[in-house]
Image (cartoon, rainbow, N blue to C red):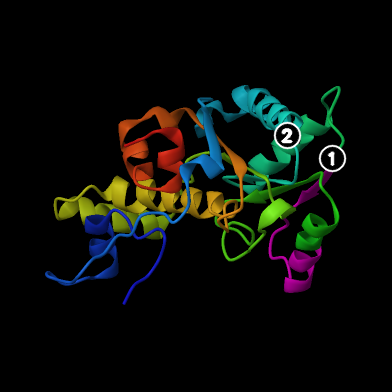
Amino acid sequence: VFFSATLAPFDACKKMLGSAEGDACLALPSPFDPAQLRAQIRPIDIRYRSREQTAPDVAQAVVSHVRQNEGNTIVFFPSYAYMSRIAELMLGMENLPDMNMLRERRAMAEDEKNALLSAFEENNDTVLLAVLGGAFSEGIDLPGKQLCNVIVVSTGMPQPDDRLRAMQAYFDSIGENGFDLCMTIPGMVRVIQAAGRLIRTDADTGTLLLVDSRYSHARIRALLAGTLIGDALGIS
């Protein structure tokens, strides 16, 4: 039995998990009202070749969202290096709003992680910079006013390595879309998991900002359809 909020699309997940023909699949709608989430997209090109050029735009988008929306915020980035670059630009900006800015570090111990999370209970102006797929993008629960805003920078695609290239080549060789199965879908799973930190109960409300020009692509939007994010954005 496989159970997750991110087991979609079914056909792709069945291929990746080794499901047999005829296995039962059941999808349930989100239990939350789309009105609980105010979601928007900033179509900034953050593909690797453009990142340095558009980094000031990303920093400005993050700061503007923090300034316009009260409460604690988590900002997710595709890598530690990019997170550090945006943090550097943010700290150098004039009229930076008052905030308790924290950062995720590599290989954090559990007590270090808990110390950062405690800031969300004690302050209402905490901004945590974190990485997609890291310690704070899944498995944490910050209901109510502990977390009011989430910003996700990128579509979450993993950095290609030898293992991913081999998997992609294998799926391509059997007539499947290797890039979609190994890069696009896992990336969007990360995005949906990270955004899922925000609305945890029927009483929660919050804002979600997705920063990446690829959110205008049909395939990316199709992967958001049927999720609370897609419903909030009006994607069907």
Q: Residue at x 82, y 25 (%)?
A: 93
Asked if residue 184 lies left or right of residue 76, the reply is left
Q: Residue at x 64, y 28 (%)?
A: 58
Find residue 143 and report its horizontal and vertical position in percent.
Answer: 66, 58
Q: Quadrant of residue 225?
A: top left
Q: Is residue 211 visible?
A: no
Q: CA distance from mark 2 to mark 1?
A: 9 Å
Residue 72 pos. (x, y %): 74, 46
Residue 191 relative to residue 90: left or right: left
Q: Which residue is mark 1?
A: 99
Q: Which residues are magenta?
A: 99-115
What is the three-letter code of the residue carrying label 2? Val
Residue 68 picture quarter: top right
Viewer-side residue, 169 vs 210: 210
* Position of residue 13 measured from the top left corner of the image (x, y, whole percent): 29, 61
Q: Work out whether residue 41 can be spotted.
A: yes
